Amino acid sequence: MKYLGIIFDSKLTFREHVNYMAEKCTKLIFALSKSAKINWGLKHAALKTIYTGGILPLLLYGAPVWGKVIDKACYKLKLIRVQRLINIKIAKVYRTVSNEALCIITGLTPIDITIQEAIEYYQLMKSSNKEGTLVDRDTEVKYWHHPAETITLPAENNEDTSTIKIFTDGSKSELGVGAGLAIFIAGTHVTSLQVK
């Protein structure tokens, strides 16, 4: 039975739905591959935009309903194959490159992790206690906190239980920038080392 774009079977395995999604996205990728060859055609930025704007929403549609089946290896592999096809086109590499390397080269999150994120985000938005939870949001660079304002340095009279402390004044010499390393055991200075 197909309801709101999700195919349900009698045992709620969602096998037909995953097959349908994988087949539909594979057809789109093969149609797109005619204009994305290694030396000419669409560049990787355009292909990445097409993936994140067109193919990924198709794969993630209804993920909170069917997403738990991704724990089974057969369903997970079908979706990884789909992502691998587009990753090869985005990275413009040989087909022998591993899937993990493709995800790193293209900068795309693996599809199983993306589906898990979609499920958790949905559950977070549907929960009644939204105020106490922290959600990462994309923030423009101009709104980022300056590192000098967020890092707090311990005062001299506070006891610190760290065993290694690194000090640098940032001064530059002919050998480069220097730093000092002091090792403390139980608050007692054991050795110092100057690094250049």
Image: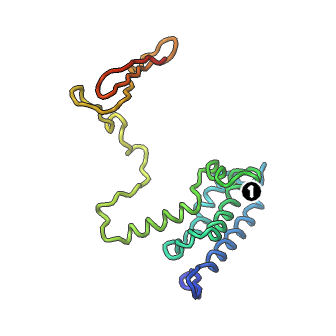
Going by the image, does 173 lie left or right of 75?
left
Q: State which quarter of the image contains the N terminus.
A: bottom right
Q: Which amino acid does label 1 sit on?
A: Ala
Above or below: residue 61 compared with residue 152: below
Q: What element carries label 1?
A: loop
Kindly identify the residue that appears in the image at 62 percent across and 74 percent down: 18
What residue do we see at 44% from left, 16% from top? 194
Residue furthest to the top in view is 174
The quadrant where residue 2 appears: bottom right
x, y percent for residue 191? 38, 19
Give the image quarter of residue 78: bottom right
Q: Nearer the viewer, residue 142 or 194?
A: 194
Total count of labels: 1
Left or right: 63 in relation to 139: right
* Left or right side of 16 for 168: left
- Residue at screen point 30% across, 67% down: 129
Q: Which colour scheme is used?
A: rainbow
Crowd class of label 1 (few under 14; some 14 to 19; many from 20; radius 10 Å): many
Q: In this view, does 66 lie to the left or right of 121?
A: right
Q: Where is residue 73 in the image (x, y as percent from the top left)?
A: 62, 68
* Observer-nearest of 98 and 4: 98
Q: Name the residue under label 1.
A: 36
In depth, the one of 20 and 153 nearer the eye is 153
Pick the front one: 36 or 62: 62
Residue 120: x %, y % from top left: 44, 65
Task: Using the image, determine if residue 98 lies above or below residue 141.
Answer: below
Residue at the (72%, 63%) spot, across then down: 32
Q: In this view, does 99 lie above or below 31?
A: above
Residue 90's image quarter?
bottom right
